[in-house]
Amino acid sequence: MRISNLPRGAVGAATLAALLASCFGVSFGATMQPGFSSALRPSTRPGFMSRVDAKEDLVYISDFASIPDGDVNVFTWDGLQVGQITNGMAAPEGLFVDAKRNLWVANITNVLVFPHGSVSPSETLTDPVGPPTDVTVCPDGTAYVADLYDLNNTDHASIQVYPPGHTSPTRNLSYDQDFRSPALTCDAAGNVFVSVLIRQSLPNAGVIVEFPGGKQGGVKDLGIVFQDVYGIKPDNAGNLLVSDFVSRTITEYTETGVATGVQIATGRSQIFGLAVSRNGRFVLGADIDNSRGVLWSFPEGVVKKRYTCCSRFGLPMQSVHGVAFDPGQAGI
């Protein structure tokens, strides 16, 4: 597969986000189809926790292309849709749930923070550098935001850093060969790992880059080569799970870049975002091919659940990008 003829502002799995804007007619901040009745999807619903036990484990799935500006769908583990978040959405992609059970949403224009059980954001992180694609929060409370590309240089991408209490980035992380930054994660020690596309054509366009301690110093390529890398999360064993969008695999590596031999073949599912359950026994993937979430047992790789929706609160999901478990992953 080659994508060298794509626009300079779009490449590989990471940039399907941008391509979908034209495919689905999304106009960020505007209604996709003016004739659609907003009454079907009110944005002022009470917090979904008014209808579910606050202790119940939940699943979040972002829909990049749903009418009018995208949404985040809320499920119980058994697949019952219990809510839909639309306030402030603008083509949402990456999702993260922190230790306080706040939901972080990487919009194409900013990052929103939703308190546990709320459908209204309590905080907005501005990003003057580029369109966000993913967000993670390290144990010290520092947030890191992956940008698809830098607005002032569309041939390069970087990571924006937000210390606790800051809604604007105070610094950034950069890797010389970073053409696109689809996704990132933090481990329990505060190391930041980024899935990076280093070229405009496939194959072998993806690598994983580590920023030790979330700092620029010591940045290194882990030496793993992917067809087109996307989602990345640590597992409870202290290794990394990485989804290869083109090879349709989720593979486990040590944090030094050595394959452990554990791999999940995703079959007909092309996986964007990843999430790992708090007990480490399940992996959730955002299946963009079939507009659903897929839950696998880990490390066995047996499909346990497919999350689809949304007859209860709106239209079916059209282009899923991000997934998260609530409560969030142990250690981060």
Image (spheres, grey):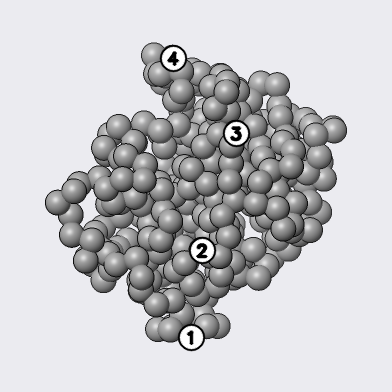
Q: Can residue 156 be seen at all in this image of the molecule?
A: yes
Res. 79 image quadrant? bottom left
**Looking at the image, residue 19 lies above or below residue 161:** above
**Mark 1 surroundings: few (<14), some (14-19) or many (≥20) residues within 10 A:** few
- Chain-order first, disc 3 or disc 2: 2
Q: Can residue 263 be seen at all in this image of the molecule?
A: no
Q: Which residue has dot 3 on it?
A: 129
Q: Secondary structure at mark 4?
A: loop
**Mark 3 surroundings: few (<14), some (14-19) or many (≥20) residues within 10 A:** some
Residue contact between numbered discs 4 and 1, judged by CB atoms under 8 Å? no
Quadrant placement of the C terminus: bottom right
| Mark in front: 1 vs 3 | 3
Instruction: Name the outermost residue toward the right.
Output: 217
**Residue at the spot 81% in from the left edge and 39% down from the top edge:** 215
Q: Which residue has dot 1 on it?
A: 53
- Chain-order first, disc 2 or disc 4: 4
Q: Which mark is residue 4?
A: 4
Q: Secondary structure at mark 1?
A: loop
3D distance between C-alphas at marks 3 and 4: 25 Å
Q: Position of residue 155 (x, y in %)?
A: 56, 19
3D distance between C-alphas at marks 4 and 1: 50 Å
Q: Amino acid at mark 3?
A: Val
- Chain-order first, disc 3 or disc 4: 4
Instruction: Name the outermost residue toward the top.
Output: 5
